[in-house]
Image (spheres, helix red, strand yellow):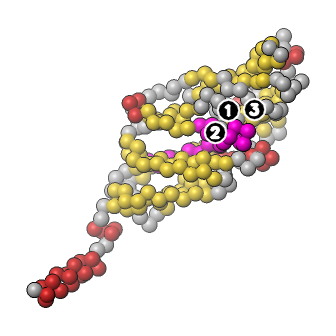
Amino acid sequence: MRRFGTVILLLLLCACSRFDPDRDSNLADLHVSVQATAATADFPESELGGALLKLYILVYRADTLVVGKTVVGLPQESYSFVFPRRNKTRPYVLQAYGSFITGEDTQHTDVWSILPRKRLRRLRAERLPHSFGARDWLGMDETRLDGIDRTETYRLTLRPLGKPCRLQFEGWRETDSYSVTLEDKTVIKLGDEGEDDYVEVLNPVLPGGNPAWLCLFGDPSQTEITVTRERAGVTNTLTVKPVPEGNQWQATFDFDNND
């Protein structure tokens, strides 16, 4: 009986020694690397102020989100992710999204959050009501895989989703309050049948200080920025188109000369 057990053990050891994961298993670890430096290139170094990056990496098939991970760190760093034991024969879509986290004056509240909208077959990058709109949605990248090569690290590089614009307030006072009108219409569709872009108008209050920074989506030269100032109980609204100032965009608001 003992001899029979020894033979069985030897057969098992022989089978294991011949096991080739590339040939004999449909599972493989998915390795992804994400780099975010390019997405911050348009921001003046002095304005980054050690801001933290919140990075989302999403893996999905067709209209099904398979897995996702989130990490917080510096935007100048490169980040690596491992998604273990994925079916290597199936096609996947990899997406990376990066957003800034607001500063200490807002207690590190996330400016953007990714929320699933499963019934509408989409994910939505939703601006929170108290978002300042500045340095918010940083960048994204996407790649499609026919399958997983376990020897490959799939690399994503965040590309900017907007242009930073400097908001300059003439005659600014510390007691003033400024709010900006923004259209939130960033939608991450899931598959070809995802819902059309959703648009919501928000009026977040800008942080105290002058100037402020706003991330513009689309062509800044064709964008109108509407800001409302409240001073001593009196409100005044002004709409301005940004103009290029060197390598940056700037919109100057002079409420005292607003006819």
Badge 1: few (under 14), some or many (20 or more) residues near its Cα, within 10 Å? many
Q: Position of residue 183 (x, y in %)?
A: 61, 25
Q: Is residue 165 left or right of residue 194?
A: right
**Residue 163, image x, y percentages:** 69, 37
- Tell me, for residue 109, which label it has, or none: 2
Residue under pointer 3: 207
Q: Secondary structure at mark 3?
A: loop
Q: Residue furthest top?
A: 259
Left-right relation of 198 to 102 = left
**Span shown in magenta:** 93-112
Kind of residue indicated by mark 2:
Thr
Q: Nearer the viewer, residue 175 or 72?
A: 175
Whether residue 157 is visible here, answered yes or no, is no
- Which mark is nearer the camera, 3 or 1? 3
Q: Badges 3 and 1: C-beta atoms under 8 Å apart? A: no
Secondary structure of the residue carrying tag 1 is loop
For residue 99, above or below residue 227: below
Residue 82 inside the magenta-drawn segment: no
**Circle 1 sits on which residue?**
133
**Residue at the spot x=16%, y=81% of the render?**
8
Residue 113 at what x, y percent from top left?
Answer: 55, 38
Q: Are marks 1 and 2 in contact (CB under 8 Å)?
A: no
Looking at the image, tell me whether mark 1 or mark 2 is earlier in sequence order. Answer: 2
Q: Is residue 33 left or right of residue 66?
A: right
Q: Residues within 10 Å of mark 2 (few under 14, many from 20)?
A: some
Residue at screen point 73% across, 50% down:
50
Q: CA distance from mark 3 to mark 1?
A: 10 Å
